[in-house]
Amino acid sequence: MNNAFILAANSVTSADAAHARLGTRFGRMDLASQLSLLAVEPFAPHFETVARDRIGIVLAARAGSLPTDVAYWNARNEPGGLSPTLFTYTLPSAAIGEIAIRHRLTGPNLCFVGGSDDVLTEAGELLRAGEADACLAIFTHVISPALTEKISLPEAARSWAVFIGRNGPGLAVLGENRRDMESFCANLRPQNLTK
Amino acid sequence: MAIATTELKTKIIESLNLQDITPDQIEDEAPLFGAGLGLDSIDALELVVMLEKNYGIVIKDIEEGRPAFRSVRTLADFIDARRSSS
């Protein structure tokens, strides 16, 4: 495939979400949506350079919406009924909706339960197919603290996002070497790397 | 006794987890949806649940509740009316 370029990259953890303020609606979101939104937030200036209906969003949620699913199950007997908001976030794709609303992005989007390599592949395919001129590739990994302890995972919540365009120069080339790109994204530090 | 709009605003903020906004920043007559407080359809459903949990008011038809959700003032009047008729 033709090379695409990572124009910006960012990584966040649950600690970032705890102190973030992104409008009145931010507090109602589940952690996966909050992290996805925060990871993408520094890219806003880039969205001005591409038609908003030509910016795609691809999201891989490694654990789906597991913490919200558990919360929903635990709340099933609440008097007065379950929270409609909680139900909304049992859909992993809710994060894409929040990003699209905030940044008025109307391009194609895709959400699936998968890993970091998958999201880069799918984002690259979207560009190669000509369905978008730029693409957000977002990876979220959110597991509730109780589960994290049980299965000895190193971190409970993390998200990274990269903004991929057809034109460089960017932070890195998204080419055929997926292993290099996975390494690049895996090593993103929790700070803004936007150029 | 008529419901105080400040109390209702507090309930709205709590039930919708609204950040960085206090009851005194919400005007009684300002629209709750769209241009005013900027709530959406999910928030509307959450408000329906809030009314049932806090005031024992059940809205079975969303069309019935639509006029009530125009503003804090109309919602307070709606609660008062339902309470006095029960």
Image (tube, coloured by chain):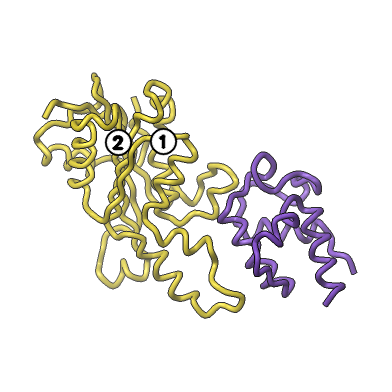
Residue A193 in picture, x, y percent from top left? 33, 31
- Residue drawn at x 18%, y 46% is A117
Badge 2 density bin: few <14, some 14–19, many ≥20, Cα 10 Å: many
Residue B78 vertical position relative to residue A14 in the rendered view, above or below:
below
Query: Which numbered tag is attached to residue A162?
Result: 2
Split into 4 quadrants, where in the image is the N terminus of chain A?
top left
Badge 1 density bin: few <14, some 14–19, many ≥20, Cα 10 Å: some
Query: Which numbered tag is attached to residue B71?
Result: none
**Residue B49 falls left or right of residue B74:** left
Mark 1 or mark 2, which has the lower sequence index?
A: 1
The amino acid type of the residue labelled 1 equals Thr
Residue nearest the viewer, comparing A146 with A176:
A176
Q: Quadrant of residue A156?
A: bottom left
Which colour represents chain A? yellow
Residue B35 in picture, x, y percent from top left? 67, 39
Label 1 sits on a secondary structure element that is loop
In the image, farthest residue toward the right: B1
Residue A133 vertical position relative to residue B76 in the rendered view, above or below:
above
- Residue drawn at x 51%, y 47% is A19
**Residue B9 falls left or right of residue A189:** right
The amino acid type of the residue labelled 2 equals Val
Per the image, the residue denoted by label 1 is A106
